Amino acid sequence: MSKLKKILIKGVVSFLSLISLYMFSSAAVFAAADISFSSSSYSTSVGNDFSVPIYVDPNGEEAFAATIRVSYDPTYLEFRSISGTGSAFPNAISESSPSGTVVISRYITPGEEGVTDRSLFATVVFRGRSAISSTSLSILDSSEVGNSEGEAISLGVLGSFTVRVSSTSSNGTLPNTNIFDTTAFLIVTGFVFI
């Protein structure tokens, strides 16, 4: 084999090795951020509040800010509040709830370390408004997670959460059926039917 062919083969092998190394290192550096709920389902009843923790997992990338949009059906659920207590993103930029969507924007103070693994972002409180066997909360793909340079981290898994809203109370009280009032009236007036 000629000397020129050996040099050419070594050059091609080196070039392919560098490309492979770059591809594997890029995959590790540019991991997608996942946004999820603490669980996948919940049961409640009309009139009861329930909390839904939202988590951000940048999968090794360092996240400093995020805007998360959660959709819900306002026919069955009523938005109540947003809490940042315990959030790894302690500063609120804005929080709003146009009908059917909750928008939460939070950030980490510049100079502090960013989030690199699954961490609490915020907790949203809803109330059951109307009975339904299944309605969903979903993280919208218009949500964003940003790094220290203000660049978006690509999104990976976006969570969804199923809620069952029953018409009966689950807070330990029984619904008022007026049966006691009717029974007491019949006993007092001397009518008892067995």
Image (tube, rainbow, N blue to C red):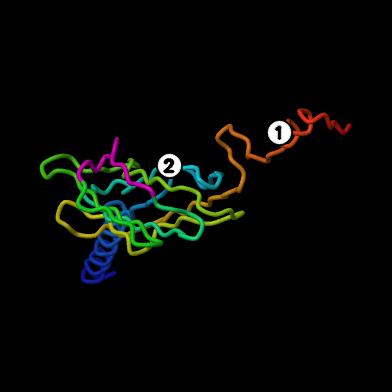
Q: Quadrant of residue 15 in the image?
A: bottom left
Residue shown at 54%/44% (left/top)? 44
Which image quadrant: the N terminus?
bottom left
Residue 167 circle label: none
Real-space CA distance between mark 2 and mark 1, rounded to the nearest whole angstrom: 35 Å
The residue indicated by pointer 1 is 180
Circle 1 packing at 10 Å, graded few (<14), some (14-19), many (20+), is: few
Q: Which of 126 and 10 is in front in this view?
A: 126
Q: Does the magenta stretch include residue 164?
A: no
Q: How crowded is mark 2: few (under 14 residues within 10 Å), some or many (20 or more)?
A: some
Is residue 49 positioned above or below 134 on the image? Answer: above
Is 192 placed left or right of 157 in the picture? right
Residue on which disc 2 sits: 51
Which segment did they paint magenta?
A: 80-91
Residue type, mark 1 in image = Phe
Q: Which one is nearer the viewer's eye here, 40 or 12?
A: 40
Q: Which callout, 2 or 1, points at the residue further toward the start of the chain?
A: 2
Image location (x, y in percent) of residue 28: 30, 51
